[in-house]
Amino acid sequence: MRRTLVTGGLLAVFAALLAQFGGALGLEEIRSALLGAALGAALGLVPGNDAALPRAVGFLVGFALGWIGYALRAGVLPDTGSGRAVAAFLVIAVLTGICAATLGWMPLWSGLLGIAAIAGAYEFAFGLDPTAFTTESVTAATTVLLAAAVGFLVGALAGAFVPDDGETREHRPVATGSSEPSVPSGRGSDNAGVQILDKPAEA
């Protein structure tokens, strides 16, 4: 609960500042900035045994491969369903091969987040004008990467320094309100719980 509140609060403040002053920083695509912040925070908050460096490297590799996929669609592949299918297959296949070559050091899911970041930031603009790839792709990439970096920093720091309630709670024995029955010592304990009934006297 504590980690959720701290991380969510910091991201909310960052999103508000980004929406208000993003234009002064050259971030023209506020939608892409919010997308990057959310994906970056998820990259840092997802629990697991992966360190921060492999996650960040995987995100950047996936992002770069996604950008190369758009370059292929803009200059080589036809802007049809088959062209988009070939680009998507190549990007994910190459990413999978790179992750496999690292023997699990670079997680596949972080690379997929990188692909999702560039796709969410640039797919709409690419569909409107594929010939403006060299300018619009750079703008979208810069915006989403900067926002993702801040979101990742917030998520990673919150995960490392803000303990969750479950991590700080001490395990105390639960009082049941009952105690073990005491066993009497001596020979009487041999006959504990045994009720002796006298035979009725014969008439």
Image (cartoon, rainbow, N blue to C red):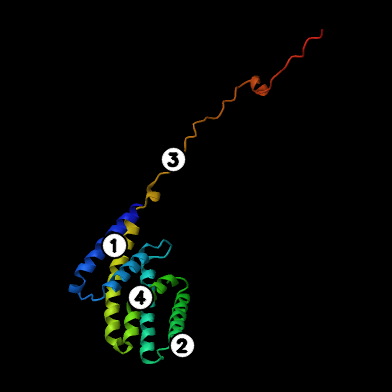
Badge 1 amino acid: Leu
Sort mark 2 into few (<14), some (14-19) or many (20+) by Cα contacts within 10 Å: few
**Tag 4, which secondary structure?**
helix
Cα gap from disc 4 to disc 1, whole angstroms:
19 Å
Badge 3 amino acid: Arg
Q: Position of residue 105 (x, y in %)?
A: 44, 70
Q: Residue at x 46, y 82 (%)?
A: 89
Which dot, 4 or 1, sits closer to the camera? 4
Q: What residue is pinned by disc 1?
A: 11
Upstream in sequence: badge 4 or badge 1: 1
Upstream in sequence: badge 2 or badge 4: 2
Q: What residue is pinned by disc 2?
A: 82
Q: Nearer the viewer, residue 23 or 184?
A: 23
Cα gap from disc 2 to disc 1, whole angstroms:
39 Å
Q: What residue is pinned by disc 3?
A: 172
Q: Position of residue 150 (x, y in %)?
A: 28, 67
Q: Position of residue 155 (x, y in %)?
A: 33, 62
